[in-house]
Image: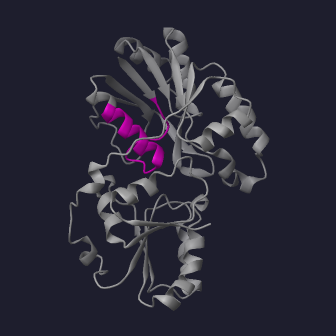
Amino acid sequence: MNIGIFTDSYFPQVSGVATSIKTLKDDLERKGHQVYIFTTTDPHVPDDAVEPNLFRFTSVPFVSFTDRRIAVRGLFHAYAVAKELNLDIVHTQTEFSMGYIGKFVAKQLKIPTIHTYHTMYEDYLHYVLNGHLLKPYHVKQFTRAFLYHVSGVVAPSERVYDTLRRYGVKTEIKIIPTGVDLTQFAQQKDPHLRDKLGLAHVPVLVSLSRVAYEKRIDKVISAMPKILEQVPQAVLLIVGDGPAREDLEAQVAELGLKEHVRFTGEIDHDDVGDYYRVGDVFVSASDSESQGLTYIEAMAADRKVVALT
């Protein structure tokens, strides 16, 4: 089949959604399908970059969520491209701009649309005017409206399935967990990374995610003084970048933990497996996960997992 995936989030953006789409694309291609990605422009990708089977559409940063983008044009261009590619099906992976473009394309071509619902939006309302503008009721309404005319919905977990049914979504929903490419985490690319980070002889806790408020990394940092009472040399390595980093760095300074909490900033996706392996334990306090891919990835890298509540 010729499959068009429409998404606002794709590499080089760092997110669970981007990772899951890349995993899906690779597996579908291994099975003999042709997969085309329709996504947003990215400031880290030059305009003249050659990206096979990938089409980018002019975009701007999303309001109050500036490391994510929404397309602002390209409706008819996307249709023209999709028609030339002779798409058999559209798979939307966002409820925003590229999702609506994907639904438009499918309607014009008279082909099915399936949709994967990735994000528990009620956990993200604080990004829009600190939660004062949008309420859970609005999430319910826009979700039902978007899913009304799709052929089917993929829920990555029972939590997502239950949420959509609670919203009153009548479309057929199938629970299909996002796959994980275990080979990326089973093989160690750089066995000396821990030494290079100066962490060879200390116990290391690793947090690896987008550094965002809903990940509740502040809870992990708050737990460090208690941890240090039991393990005085322990270091928390926070891998990734995002809008909460500045506040978290201020929290670290206020608690006097600069020697015990380190920030790596954004890393290359291909190095994720090695950063899991730097840690003795993977820690997370996030309660906004639709599936929790990082837990699976950490276990695939043979690391213990501690989830804080």
Q: Residue at x 70, y 33 (%)?
A: 165
- Residue at position x 31%, y 35% from top? 26
Instruction: Please state which of residues 107 and 294 is positioned toward the viewer in this rendering.
Output: 294
Residue 282, position in %: x, y? Answer: 43, 67
Q: Which residues are magenta?
A: 6-27
Instruction: Indicate the quadrant containing the N terminus: top left, top right, bottom left or bottom right.
Output: top left
**Coloring scheme used:** one colour
Q: Position of residue 203 (x, y in %)?
A: 38, 81
Q: Is 280 left or right of 260, judged from the image as shown? A: left
> Can residue 247 be seen here?
no
Q: Is residue 20 magenta?
A: yes
Asked if residue 33 lies left or right of residue 187, the reply is right
- The answer to whether residue 142 is magenta is no
Residue 191 is left or right of residue 138, and the answer is left
Q: Quadrant of the C terminus?
A: bottom right
Residue placed most toward the observer, 306 or 205: 306
- Between 54 and 153, the residue placed more toward the observer is 153
Q: Nearer the viewer, residue 198 or 202?
A: 202
Return the x and y of residue 201 as percentages of the image width and height. Answer: 30, 85
Q: On the image, which quarter does residue 276 sit in?
A: bottom left
Query: Is residue 177 in view from this perspective?
Result: yes
Compared to 89, does 161 lie above or below?
below
Residue 238 percent across, percent down from the top left = 44, 69
Q: Quadrant of residue 279?
A: bottom left
